[in-house]
Image: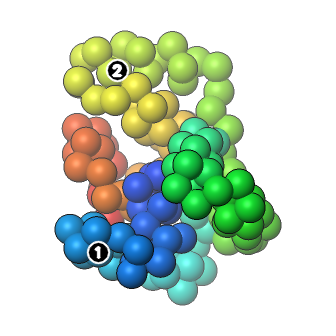
Amino acid sequence: METGVDTSALYYYVTDARTLRPSERQAAKRAAASIDLAYDSGKNLAIPSTVVIELANILHHRNGARACQAVLEALLQDSRNALIPADESSFTEALILSRKLGVKYTDCVIYLTLKKAGAIRLITADKEFAAFKDLTLL
C-alpha cells in the first residue's frame, strides 16, 4: 500500500460538507479530492485499524449508532480500502515516538502502522503529521 488515509481526511470524506463548520469545509474539499484521485487512479487506500476506531467514535458521538454503522459497513466492504491492523510493537514504539516528537499517541500508532505497511503518502487534514518527514502529505 503506497497511500494511507488518516481519521481527519476520512471523517471529512464521509461527512456531508453542509454539516461542517465553514472553517472545515476547505479541508473537507481537499481531503475528498485526494481520496477521489487515489480511487480514480486505481489505488487502494490503506486504512489503519486505529483510524477505523477513531472514526467510529466520532461518528457514533455526532451521528448516532445507526449512521456510524452504515458508514463503517460501506468503508469496510469497499474493495478499494485495505484495513491495516496495528501490530503489537507499534503501540510501544508509538509511546517513544510521541514523547520524542510531541505528536499525539494515536497519530504515532497510525504513522507506524502505515510505514510498516509500506505507505509513503498520507491523505490527512491533520497538520501534526508533518512531524513525520518520511511521509508525503496529500
- Please state if 4 lies on the left or on the right of 18 as rendered: right
Q: Position of residue 43 (x, y in %)?
A: 57, 73
Distance between mark 2 and mark 1 Cα atoms:
31 Å
Circle 2 sits on which residue?
Answer: 97
Residue appearing at x 68%, y 65% in the figure: 67
Q: Is residue 135 above or below residue 94?
A: below
**At 34% from the left edge and 29% from the top edge, which residue is drawn?**
104
Q: Quadrant of the N terminus?
A: bottom right
- In the image, residue 58 sits, relative to residue 66, either above or below, namely above
Mark identifier at residue 41: none
Residue 45, position in %: x, y?
Answer: 57, 63
Tag in front: 2 or 1:
1
- Occupied quadrant, residue 99: top left
Residue bearing the label numbered 1: 25
Residue 121 in picture, x, y percent from top left: 39, 57
Callout 2: SS: helix
**Helix or strand or loop: what does disc 1 sit on?**
helix
Taking the image as drawn, is residue 70 in sight?
Answer: yes
Three-letter code, disc 2: Leu
Three-letter code, disc 1: Arg
Front-most of residues 115 and 25: 25
The correct choice, above or below, for 91 with respect to 131 in the image is: above
Quadrant into which the C terminus falls: bottom left
Q: Is residue 48 visible?
A: no
